[in-house]
Amino acid sequence: MKFRQFKFWLVLGAMLCAACANERIMDSANSLSTTANVSNTAAVGNAATPANVAPKLELDVPYVPTHETVVDEMLKMAEVKGTDILYDLGSGDGRIPITAAQRFGTRGVGIDLNPERVKEANANAQKANVTDKVRFIEGDLFEQDFSEATVVTLYLLPDVNLKLRPKILDMKPGTRVVSHNYDMGDWEPEKSKTIQTPNGETHYVYFWRVPEKK
Ligand SMILES: C[S@@+](CC[C@H](N)C(=O)[O-])C[C@H]1O[C@@H](n2cnc3c(N)ncnc32)[C@H](O)[C@@H]1O
């Protein structure tokens, strides 16, 4: 079942059961968790939806932050430096661009569809004193232009990576791409690494470089 369909049935079930809107549900296939307020737009405009409730979001990936140990490895593997422009597609609380800005002075942009995440990321950038280096855009990663990036970071899902792949392959040759946990199908990574987080979880990091056009 496709992730969007899965979310639709998840929300429908949640509505029928009048379940709590913030109940956390594990997505065992992907070890990412989602919440019931992350829903399919089919639920929007339902007669049962009160007018003062914010419109529901059709997220392609639920929010799960990357562990700091994995962030460190992603930045290391991509050899991120001060002259880079880093885009994190689906940026969550902004930790990847913020860490790169703090550590290397890298300019960064985060894109996230969820306004709550963008608000959180902006607050974190302020706390970290890097608002002159990073900015966060509320938008759909499939619709935003990230062609200026020299480094792209991802913590998405396998099907989302594959859907993004043609756009990434169309970027400037040499653009570095680093992904947490999920690969790019038959596009072989230049490097990959297994990481053990301090809490004993196993994570994977993959690295590619956009090749010259043929
Ligand atoms: C697994 S989290 C990763 C967060 C962050 N990059 C990190 O590694 O800590 C995925 C993020 O993608 C966002 N997201 C999901 N679908 C999106 C879309 N179509 N466009 C932009 N962001 C999206 C979610 O709101 C969530 O914050």
Image: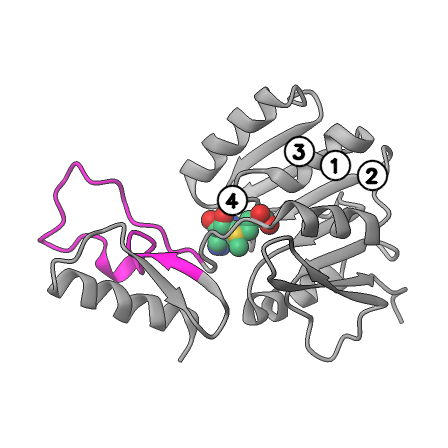
Q: Amino acid at mark 4?
A: Asp
Nearer to us in this view, 202 or 176: 202
Q: Marks 1 and 3: in contact by CB < 8 Å? A: yes
Which mark lies nearer to you, 1 or 4?
Answer: 1
Q: Residue furthest left?
A: 48
Q: Amino acid at mark 2?
A: Asp
User: Which residue corresponds to mark 2?
Assistant: 84
Q: Residues within 10 Å of mark 4 (few under 14, many from 20)?
A: many
State the CA–CA distance, disc 3 to disc 1.
5 Å
Q: Marks 2 and 1: in contact by CB < 8 Å? A: yes
Nearer to us in this view, 99 or 175: 99
Label placed on residue 112 = 4
State the CA–CA distance, disc 4 to disc 2.
20 Å
State the CA–CA distance, disc 4 to disc 3.
14 Å
Q: Residues within 10 Å of mark 1 (few under 14, many from 20)?
A: many
Residue at mark 2: C-beta within 8 A of ligand 1: no
Dot placed on the residue nearer the N-terminal end, 1 or 4: 1
Q: Is residue 61 visible?
A: yes
Q: What residue is at 40 percent from the left and 80 percent from the top? A: 1
Q: Main secondary structure of the magenta part?
A: loop
User: Which residue corresponds to mark 3?
Assistant: 98
